[in-house]
Every structure is written in C-alpha cells, then in structure tokens.
Amino acid sequence: MDPTPAGRGTAAPAPADDRSTLTLHVNGTARTLTLDHRTTVLDALRQHLGLTGVKKGCDHGQCGACTVLVDGRRANSCLLLAVAHDGARVTTVEGLADGDRLHPLQAAFLERDALQCGYCTPGQICSAAGMLDEAAAGFPSHVTPPTADVPVGPAPLGADEIRERMSGNLCRCGAYPHIVRAIEDVAP
Amino acid sequence: MSHAPQPLGAPVVRREGREKVTGAARYAAEHAPPGCLYGWIVPAAVPKGRVTAVRTAEALALPGVHTVLTPDNAPRLEEPDDPVLAVLQNDRVPHRGWPVALVLAESLEAAREGADAVEVEYGTTDHDVVLTGDHPGLYTPEKANGGYPAVRERGDFDGAFAAAPVHIDATYTLGGLHNHPMEPHASTAVWADGHLTVHDSSQGSTVVCESLAQILGIDRDRITVVSEHVGGGFGSKGTPRPQAVLAAMATRHTGRPVQLSVPRRFMPALVGHRAPTVQRVRIGADRDGVISALAHEIATHTSTVKEFVEQAAVPARVMYSSPHSRTVHRVVPLDVPSPSWMRAPGEASGMYALESAMDELACALGLDPVELRLRNEPADEPDSGRPFSSRNLTACLDEGARRFGWYDRDPAPASRQEGPWLLGTGVASATYPVLLSPSAARAHAAPDGSYRIGVNATDIGTGARTVLAQIAASALGTAQENVRIDIGSSDLPRGSVAGGSSGTASWGTAVHRAATALAGRLAAYDGPLPAEGVTATADTTQEAAQKSPYARHAFGAHFAEVAVDSVTGEVRVRRLLGVYAAGRVLNSRTARSQFLGGMVMGIGMALTEGSTMDPAYGDFTERDLASYHVPSCADVPDVQVHWIDEEDPHLNPMGSKGLGEIGIVGTAAAIGNAVRHATGARLRSLPLTPDKVLPYLP
C-alpha cells in the first residue's frame, strides 16, 4: 500500500538538504509528506493535502482564519513550520463532522447564521472547539474574575467570556454576535 | 411537490452554508490545476519615480523559479478602461506597492524567495502623499463617484447662513480606511485549448470577463471567469483587480496554470481604499432648529493613476430640509494608491460628518437630537425636488428611540458615571440610495417539476443564492427547495456587480421577470412538459435604464451607548441598535446578518480603524491586520437590528431596497455623539482611539 496518500507535492523526491520527510496525523489519517523546510502547516494542509477548508487570511498569525487543532490545542497553522511538527495530530474543519452529521458547532453556526462570506468560518469553528476544551479544563481568560480557588473547575462561559476567548479570530463580515450565540448554544 | 411555498421574507437558511461550515466551499485560490505555477508580486519600493533596471538573474537561478515578468518582458496589453489594471506595461512608479515584477515558480515558497531576489533600481522624484484641507493641488472635478455632480448649489447659502441666528461650522477629518475582506484577492488562471478560465475572487465575474477580454484582446466567448465563493469584498472586489490581469497574462505567457494571491500587506496598495476626507459642514438654523442653510464641502485625495472622488457630500442633498444649500467635492491627486469603493462610499464618510454636525446643532440649541431631525424632515428630496418613493426615517427614529429607551437620558454631558466609566448615548440617521443595474436571467422548467435558474450573480456572503431562489420560487408559485440556482460564472446570463447594495434588486428583477415569463409559458401546457423542458429568459437592460420620477433611498437610525474609561481613554460600545426602512425584506435571516455586519464595520470606523500616510516613507503606515485594527469579537456587543415594514410600489417587482451598506452609515456618528454625551468632548477626527480621547477627560 502506498504510504503517501494522494495529494499534490507528495510524489516525494529523495530528501535533500532543504526538504524533509515527515508525517502529520490529519483528521485521524497518517499523511507522510516530503516538504520544503519553509512550508508551514497551513500550506502543507492546503497545497499538499488539498484540505482547503483551512484558510489563509494573512499568513502572519493576525487573523485566525488558519486555526486548526494541533495535538488538541488551537493554533494558527500559518505560524507553524511543518518540519517542526513531525508526528503531530492535526484536526481541521474537514475532520469535525461525523460523516453527514455536522459537529454541534457547525450545526449551531448554520442555525444562527453565524457566517456570511464563510472565509473565517472554518477557523472560527476550530477555534471554538479548542476554546470549549480550554474552558472545560479550567483555563482562565482575561475577563475571568480573579478567584482564590485555584485551580478552578470548568470556567463558566458567558457571552463576555466567549467574546474574549474568540478574539483571535477576525470576521470582517461582522458576524460576531451570531458567532457568540452559536457557541453559547453548544457551551455546557 | 414535497415542500409548500413560503412567502418572500421567510428566514430560509443560506444555501451554501453547509459547504462553508464544513470547509467544502472552494474559493479562488483553492483550485489546483495540475502543473500550476505560483505567482508572487514584487511591489515598488519607492513612492514615486521610474524603474531604471530590473535584474532577474539571481531570482531565475533559484530552484523552482520559472519566469520573472517585468515591464521589459511582460506581454503588451490593450489599454484598459481602468488604469490600475495596466500592470507591467511601463516603467512608471505612481506609488509604493505598484507591481514592478511578477515571479512565477513551482511552489509558493520558491515564488516568494524569487520575489525577494529580484533587484529593482529606481530613479526617484519627490513625492507628496499627505492630504490637507488647503492643499494647493485641490481642484473641483466634474463628477464624484457614482456619477454625481461634484457641485450643487441651491438658493443663496452665504446669505442664508449669515442671516441665521444659530450657526454650526465644524470640520471633521477621516483617515484612510481599508476594506480588508478576510479572503485576500486571488486568481487561478488556466489557458488551455485557446480558452482562458479564471477563478477570481471578485464581486462580479461578468465585468472581470469583459475587462480581461478587452485588455488581452481576445473574444469574450473565449474567457470564463468563475467566482463561486468569495470571501468578502466590501467594494474592493467590485472592480477587476490586478491579480486577475497578472494571472491571465502569466498563464497565457507560460502556457501553465497560474495561481496568484495578493499577500495581506500588499492589499492596501492594490485593491483600493476609502480615501481620507477633510469635511467642513456649516449649518444655519433658527432657534427652533429648523435649518435654513446647509453646506457640506469635502476635500479628498486620489492617485495620479486615476480620478476617484469619494462622494461624501452627496447625502446632504438627500437628508434634511435645506432651502439654501451648497455641496462641493474637491480632490487632489497624490502619490498614493488609487482609492476606490469601500462599503457605502460617500454615505459612510459623509454621514459621519453631517450627523455629527446635526448633534452639534442639537447641543447648541439645547434640543433633543431625535427631535431636531424630525423638525427637518423634507417634503421632497431637497436637491432634486422629486418626491420620495418612500421615506420612513421618522418611523426609524421613533421606533429606535422607543426600543433603545432613548428618552431616559439626561441630555447634560458627562452626567452618568459608573466607577471609572463615563457613560453616554448618541443617535444618528442613515441613508443609502436605491440602485438598479441591468442583468439577465434564464429560467427553465423540467418535466419532473423542478426548476433551474441561471444568472451571473455573485454571493460575497450576502446570501444571494438563497434570496434569488426565493424570488424565483415566489414567481413560480413553488417552494424554494424545488428551484436550483446557478450563479458565479461569466458563462451564465450577464449579471451586475455585487455592489451598491443593488445585487438583490438587479439580479432579482431579472430572475423575477424570467420566472414570471416561464410561469406564463407553463400555463399553456395541459399535459406533461416536453422532454427538454421549457425555458424563458429576461433582460432588464431597458428597465434599468429608465429614470424613476421618484427619489428612492433606504433610511435608518442608529442608537449607541458607550462607556469611556476615564483612566485610559478607551471607548467601549455597550449597546448598538439599528432600525431600518429598506423596503420589503426578502430573507429575514440573511438580511439581519447584513445589517449587523455593516454596523460592526461602523464600530471599527468609529473606534479602531484608521490608516495614515507616512509623509517621509510615502505609504500607509497600517498595512496589515496587526496594525490596522478591524473589530474583534470582544469589541462588539450584542448588536440589535430591527426594521420597519415598508411597502413601496416604486422599486422593483419584489419591493426591496438594498441593505448591504446602510448598516455602516451613521454608526460611527452615533458612537461619536455618544462619546460627546459621555465626556462633554466633541472630537472631530476618527477613530476615537485612547490617545485622542484621553486629553479631554477630567
């Protein structure tokens, strides 16, 4: 069996000084690629694995459109070099749905019309998924009231908490109020 | 039929929503033809001068670099109607960021490295990039954007102003603003078998197709431009942009597919911006607040490449009774990137100044600002004398004041405090014209009872597919689920640009006409339809060219509550309400999102967004999203949107007005007026960043 599933750029010439062979576990599948050392995780996903649900909005970590989950934590994939992430588990928006059944966040975004142009949407949804896990793990945010009880349990997610925690993902269409409601629908 | 028809206006879920939330929707740079080359623009590194040499040997020696196009070797183009598209045609550098070379390589990484390796030498001359209200180069153009006369005079402004017992004379300044849609401008172009196919991030692929045909000198039928999903535009994708021309030129030159995205930091130079304005407003009124004299005079910049004049004085011709009026635009060509459309060009900028001045007048009179506006309702459109087809500004103000709890306020400034926060409320009106552009559509009925509509509309996030299906279904008396809709390709019947808040009206009229004609033809069939189905078409070219005897505009009212941090000068919007009269709303779900989005952009205009020209360096200082601050989630409260049921028989078959832009109009003024109420300080320059606000706090 071909260990390198189909995708552009995966024809894997022998590693040279400026390329390395690495494996990303993307949406549950091992994908072995030989990549230019300058290739970001974002470009590995978009250009080499055809996962164009991951968006490039600024390529500089300023907009959040490229947000994916890396080993369960949200990250701007444009700021990560693929060569430094050999073995990482990456979840993209394409990996959230269960077959035809949408992830609850995807369903809530659709129901609340929490999108217009849709270009920030995959990043928003991945970011929200990571954020819910962070809150469940008790990570405080800038707006979490200081408490003597540290560590606290799951951080309660009111609208202000969601707004603060989602502020790394820009939406120029201005869907924020609907994004907040969609996440509130899913938050415990 | 499996579904019951729903009335127009139903909150139908957007058709492409599922593709967008699952990542399946493909945008212009997400098409990957085999053998694709990747482009990287080399931007001019001086603000004014000429390219004297481009050395490409080092770049071409890099692994993966295929070709470097320069003004010396790039294919010659026909002279485009829009001079910003004449790329790599000569050695002139009109502003920083102008493309001086294009590197094509086997990968993005190689293209970028190649662009860094291209050596460009310039001969420079002195540049001038800073607009001032008294710049010696200011002149009065013939027309402003939109075809409006640059100057209009009614009555005797000078005499009436001098005679008025109450005067406002205030000057407001706005810096440049950037559209910054989340999807950067991009094109994937393929030249194969004598046919050019371009996936372009555009607000109107018919226009892009026709432009490319003219510029490349090839037949329109040999070009297909596809804009299936577009990651926002806000005007910056409303005209063809250089990346489409460069990608098309490059694929034809190399014989390879070419993909070209504009890096975020290059966008301010290449895709237009809202030009800065210096706006003087003078109002003369009697002691009851009734306006006798109104002048709105604009100074703005354009580039040396083309004349674009932000029509900021135009709303003063529409809004209020003003028997004696002067509205003037003046412009100076500077060595800056070419300005263009940004959401509500003219209205957003002009209504900031006019609605701030109205608040100043209310304060000067000790009159409630809602009441002041009600006292200046005109019987007919002041400038043209035409009757309004409908004008429900009064209803918007009244309904907004009621919902907002407006009259609970103590009008005295700086009268509410909550810890370190100073609280205030403000109001402003909004307006946007009703525009209609020619479009064509095709409607087809299949024997199985399904329908298929074709129109080259573009869905830039508005929900165009969805609302057009609703319009067709309504005309056909069927459920929208039975209607398939094809949009986003120049091979479809000609569609106008998704701009000027005119998309739904323009495409929708064509769709309605075609679907109505189809319904008429279907009525003639007793038995089953022929196997090939039945087709009808419509073209609204004649209909759209007719001048309406009515002045047609949407109106709205914005109410804002702000909190100003007396320690830091930070302004936070606590509440924001918009109430609109925009004709019949055809899809309440997607309409709400559009109003909301305009208001959120208005928050940015008021508080965080502003681009400044560095006089020495000669470029925008804020070129990326780290320095140019579009609102983030934490900047935006739970914005409220409402609309008035408005029946207007003088619009189009749907009875709709546009609603994509009016949300931004007036929002910044409402916030600025609320800051004045909170602090007592009248600040006349946006954005209201802490450094501007803090010096005025106690």
Image (cartoon, rainbow, N blue to C red):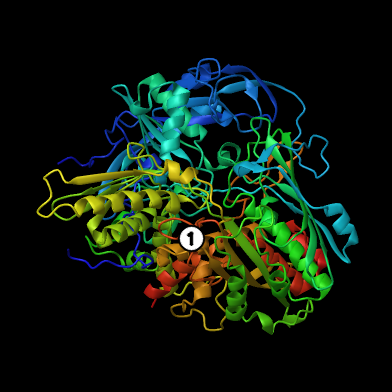
Of residues B405 and B24, the one drawn nearer to the viewer in this rendering: B405
Residue ID at (56%, 31%): B82
Q: Is residue B663 left or right of residue A124?
A: right
Q: Quadrant of the C terminus of chain B?
A: bottom right
Residue B634 lies, with reference to residue B419, above or below; the image says above
Q: In terms of depth relative to the viewer, which is nearer, B571 or B460?
A: B460
Q: Position of residue A145 (x, y in %)?
A: 57, 79
Residue A129 placement (x, y as % from top left): 38, 65
Q: Position of residue B240 (x, y in %)?
A: 49, 36
- Vertical position of residue A26 compared to residue A125: above or below: above
* Res A66 seen here: no
What residue sits 39% from the left and 66% below the top?
Answer: B9
Crowd band around label 1 with a 10 angstrom C-alpha radius: few (<14), some (14–19), many (20+): many
Say whether residue B592 is visible: yes
Q: Is residue B113 above or below residue B575?
A: above
Quarter holding residue B341: top right
Q: Amino acid at mark 1?
A: Gln
Task: Residue under label 1, please give it.
Answer: B594
The chain to which mark 1 is attached is B
